[in-house]
Each structure stands twice: as structure tokens, then as C-alpha cells.
């Protein structure tokens, strides 16, 4: 039985992770953490009381975090202090915060990915190879769309695609970001030659896609040695 803690448990992603993990016989959820000052502190979430105290990390094995950069920076201190495995899906992190993740991963196992979907992580492998096969005559651009409340733009997933493609082609890849309505997440990579165009598109239909990936990562990271891992490691790709 894996004892699980969830950061931002009252947020859209945190709540969905809680709901799906609570149905999974492999988990016992022992911590629902929210930031101090949140009106929901002390209220019940299932059998748990929502807490703002990191001392609850004593009761868990794995801590899952899909929050915001400021909260994640604090959560990194918590998992290092309490020596807990960490699954991190927060995006929009700055260079100093990314460096901190690397430092904490020397103390505890950290699974960090801008996107925990199986499909996206498969495309992370395929798309650079396609770019190499098509060669320099094909221009490449990325278009991503998310809901209007998403704070970071471009998305972490789009940046990851851009970096992988830049490494493969030795060219900078333009990224276009759209923030409209309630779009969960769309990513399109466009390869355009002189007389043909190839488009690879991934659409997330629900946040369950990311929540289920986080749950898979939480099972995988349990008992792993300290280190920085990705969903590629989790999926064995």
C-alpha cells in the first residue's frame, strides 16, 4: 500500500488526482495539502481534513504536486526535509526553480515532466526522429492551445517539443500559444515542405489523462533511489 500525499488538493488537478487515487487499491491517501490562508483548510475531503501543515509528510511515501511555481518551490523544501518521493507536474518554472529540482533530486527520487500523458511522451520520442528524416527542407512550427486560466505560455509541453526539435534540427522552433475558453490541452507540430504539409496533433479530452499519468508515476517512483526521472523512465520508453 502506497501512502500518498497531494499538494493543492482542492485545485482542479489535485482534486482529480485525489478522486482517482482514492478508487485505487494500491493507495492510501494520508495528506491533502493546501496553502495557508485557503478558506478550505480544516474542512473534510473524503476521510481527510485539508491541512496547511507540511508535518503531514511524515505519514506518506509519495508526494504529488500539480500546483504553481511558488508553491512548488516550497514543496521542494518539504520533500527534501522529510525525504519523500516526489511526482511533479507543475509548469511555468523559472531557471532557479528548475535548478532547485535538480538539487532536491540528489536527495530524493523525483519524477518531473511537463506532461504525464502516455501519448505525449510517445510523441516526444517520435517527433525528433521525423524531423531528422524529413531534413532541412521542412520548416517546423508548434501551435498549442489551453484554457484561458492557464498562466504560463507557451506550455511546458510545447517548450519540451521545441527543445527536442531544436536539438534534432539545430534550428530554433517557433511556438504559438492560444488561451481560450476551457480547452484542456491541444498541441500541433507542423512540418511544411514546398508542396506538402504534415501535422501531428495531440488533444487532451480531460484532465484525467494527466491525473492517471501522475498515479502511474507515483506507483513507479515508490522505492526508487534518489535521482531525477521523467515519464519516459516511468513508461520504459
Image: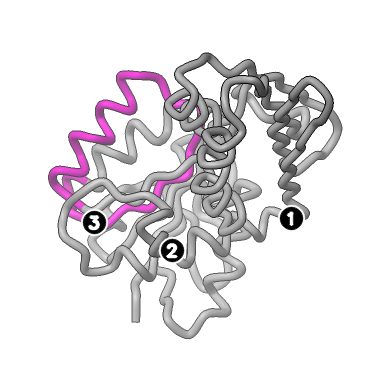
Residue 84, which numbered label?
3
For marks 1 and 2, the one nearer the N-term is 1
Which residue is at 76% across, 34% downward? Answer: 147
Q: Residue at x 54, y 54 (%)?
A: 122
Q: Is residue 115 above or below residue 17?
A: above
Q: Which residue does the numbered mark 2 point to in the structure image?
A: 235
What percent of the width, then of the height, locates residue 84?
23, 56
- Depicted 190 relative to depicted 63: above or below: above
Mark 3, secondary structure of its residue:
loop
Q: What span is colored magenta in the figure?
A: 80-108
Above or below, 69 relative to 232:
above
> In the picture provided, is 63 more to the left or to the right than 23?
left
205 vs 122, left or right, is right
- Is the residue 30 above or below the residue 97 in the image? below
Instruction: Confirm or deny contact between disc 3 and disc 2 (CB under 8 A).
Output: no
**Distance CA(mark 1)–CA(mark 2):** 20 Å
Q: Is residue 107 magenta?
A: yes
| Residue at the spot 50% in from the left edge and 33% down from the top edge | 160
Q: What is the x, y in percent for residue 108?
A: 19, 51
* Disc assigned to residue 206: 1
Q: Earlier in the sequence, mark 3 or mark 2?
A: 3
Q: Of 117 and 174, which appears nearest the observer?
A: 174
- Badge 2 local density, few (<14 within 10 Å), some, or many (20+)? some
Circles 1 and 2: CB atoms closer than 8 Å: no
Residue 236 among magenta residues: no
Q: Secondary structure at mark 1?
A: loop
**Which sits in the foreground, 71 or 116?**
116
Amino acid at each position: 500500500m502506497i501512502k500518498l500525499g497531494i499538494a493543492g488538493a482542492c485545485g482542479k488537478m489535485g482534486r482529480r488526482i485525489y478522486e482517482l487515487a482514492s478508487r485505487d487499491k494500491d493507495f492510501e491517501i494520508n495528506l491533502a495539502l493546501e496553502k495557508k490562508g485557503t478558506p478550505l483548510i480544516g474542512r473534510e475531503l473524503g476521510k481527510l481534513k485539508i491541512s496547511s501543515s507540511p508535518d503531514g509528510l511524515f505519514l506518506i511515501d509519495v508526494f504529488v504536486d500539480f500546483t504553481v511555481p511558488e508553491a512548488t518551490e516550497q514543496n521542494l523544501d518539504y520533500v527534501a526535509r522529510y525525504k519523500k518521493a516526489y511526482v511533479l507536474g507543475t509548469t511555468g518554472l523559472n531557471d532557479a526553480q528548475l535548478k532547485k529540482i535538480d538539487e532536491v533530486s540528489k536527495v530524493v527520487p523525483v519524477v518531473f515532466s511537463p506532461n504525464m500523458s502516455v501519448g505525449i511522451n510517445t510523441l516526444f520520442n517520435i517527433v525528433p526522429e521525423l524531423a531528422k528524416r524529413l531534413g532541412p527542407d521542412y520548416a517546423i512550427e508548434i501551435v498549442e492551445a489551453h484554457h484561458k486560466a492557464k498562466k504560463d505560455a507557451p506550455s511546458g509541453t510545447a517548450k519540451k517539443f521545441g527543445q527536442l526539435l531544436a536539438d534534432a534540427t539545430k534550428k530554433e522552433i517557433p511556438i504559438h500559444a492560444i488561451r481560450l475558453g476551457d480547452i484542456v490541452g491541444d498541441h500541433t507540430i507542423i512540418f511544411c515542405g514546398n508542396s506538402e504539409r504534415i501535422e501531428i496533433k495531440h488533444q487532451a479530452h480531460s484532465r484525467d489523462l494527466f491525473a492517471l499519468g501522475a498515479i502511474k508515476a507515483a506507483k513507479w517512483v515508490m522505492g526508487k533511489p534518489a535521482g531525477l526521472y521523467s515519464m519516459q523512465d516511468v513508461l520504459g520508453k
